[in-house]
Structure formats: structure tokens, C-alpha cells
Image: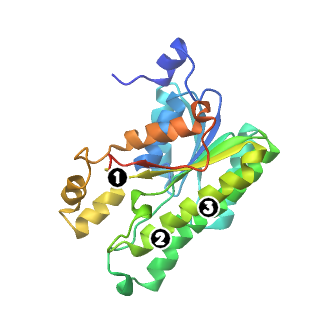
Amino acid sequence: MQTTTRQKNNNCEGMLSNKVALVTGASRGIGAAAAKLFAEEGALVTLIARTEAALRSVVEEITAHGGRADYIVADLANSASIERAVQMTVERHGRLDIAFNNVGILIPVSPLAEVKEEDFDLLNAVNYKGIWVAMKAEIKAMLSTAGAGAILNNSSVGSFIGNPGLSAYAASKRAVNSLTETAAIEYGPAGIRVNAIAPGTTMTEMIEQWVAQDPAIIEKNNSLTPLRRAADPNEIAQAAAWLLSDHASYITGVVLPVDGGRRA
């Protein structure tokens, strides 16, 4: 039986107890799973995404189980919208302790020379620039309020290798790895840790888009994964929660594969 926030708080503090958390892309998939888990582990969570109905549903589920959560509707391809969401989080809760930048989209799978420029631009506006803008706003918020903090970016196991059909997507995630590592060096002295996770095949709506183009892709990926299966979003969320918690207090600048052994 899943442990609810109320049950956990009655027994012991969660590993994110009393943290003010922000999760982007939180209306579904890994983001929604992370928001629920962070609340279960004691955080006060602000969920950010474009779809209000989905955000409201996740927040209602969290609060029904005794967690603390609210939401802000924002376009993660729009810099002003992202900055406003971070600012609103601080205005509501007085500070920002941890942030999970889970934003990411997938464009149609195709060879590099056949990728449409408008698709390339949209993908990078969200997957790369969106995380850059969010990190800038989050770092400033942490420095001016909590004085320290932890940021986690969602990358991909595909960021480490060549990816036929996914050239732009993989490149955008490799750029996220570089942002993560550089920010860890720049802001470590100020007490801000910056890490990333690199999930393998995970059962989200994004993978369903890929399946629509290649029905055998999950089977193909599983055959290359030592655990021989895809991840559930909650398994990725567990890694995210740990890296953002004080249990990982001496870890920064890491891009952690959460991939069932794919990179082994």
C-alpha cells in the first residue's frame, strides 16, 4: 500500500520535509509523479505547466492525501511566463529551496536532414532555453531567499550517445548536461547544488508519441536495457527526490543515468 503524506508525517519526517519545491512540466508523467512524491516526502510543492485542468487534478490528489501543493499555469516555451512562475512561487511561500526542471518535448522522429526548422526551434525553445531561463530565475530566487538550494534538471540517457532519428532532441538534452555541470561549478560556492538525471525508456505520453511512429521501439529499447523493461515514472521521481534532498548534500555537477543499466 502506498504511504500517504499524512501517514509519513505521523511517523517520521520525509526526506524533503519543510522544503519549498517547484516542479515544471508537472501536469503528467515524470513531473506529476515527482510532485506527488515530493509532497509525500514533506515538501510544499508548486506545480507548473500549461494545462490548468491537469494541474488542478494533480494538486487535488496531493491535498486529498494530506500533502501541500498549489499550481501556476505557465508556458514553458515563454521566458517571461517561466520567470513569472518562479517569482509567484517565492511571493506565495517566501522562498525557494529546491527545483525540478522536468520540461521537455519530442518532435517527429526523422533523420537529421529531414528535421523541420520550426520543429527544431520549438524543441530548443522548450528543452534547452526553457531550462536555461528556469535555472536563471531559480538561482536568483534561492540566493535572495533561502540563501542556498538544489536544482535538478531532467536530461535523457540519449544525451550520452548518438541517436538516429532523434538528433535535435538528444542534442538539446546534451546541452542541458552542460548547463548543469557549469552551474554546479559557478554556484557551488554559494551553496546551490545543481544535478541532472538521465532517464532511460519511461512509460509516459512522450514515449507513446514515439510508439506511434515506431510500434516496436519499447521492445527494441528493452532489449538493450539490462533490466529488460521500461521505467515507471515514479521510479524516476524517486531518484529526483533523493538528489534534491539533504541525503545528497555532497553531490553536485552529476548527470545520473536512471536507465535500467542502459549505459553500463
Residue placed most toward the observer, 46 or 255: 255
Give the alpha-carbon distance from disc 3 to disc 1, as whole Å: 25 Å
Between 237 and 118, the one lying in front of the other is 237
Q: Is residue 39 visible?
A: yes
The residue where tag 2 is placed is 171
Could you classify mark 1 by the number of other residues whose Cα lies within 10 Å: few (under 14), some (14-19), or many (20 or more)?
some
Q: Can residue 75 be seen in this view?
A: no
Tag 1 secondary structure? loop
In which quadrant of the rendered image does the N terminus lie? top left
Q: Badge 2, how many Cα within 10 Å: few under 14, some, many 20+?
A: many
Q: Nearer the viewer, residue 40 or 236?
A: 236
Q: Which of marks 2 and 1 is in front?
A: 2
The image's mark for residue 204 is 1
Give the amino acid type for the residue marked by disc 2 in the picture: Ala
User: At x 39% / y 72%, what residue is drawn?
Assistant: 107
Q: How far apart are marks 2 and 1 (CA)?
A: 21 Å
Which badge, 3 or 1, comes first in the chain's sequence? 3
The Cα atoms of the two marked residues, 2 and 3, are separated by: 12 Å
Furthest toward the right, the residue is 144
Which residue type does callout 3 highlight? Leu
Dots 3 and 1: beta carbons under 8 Å? no
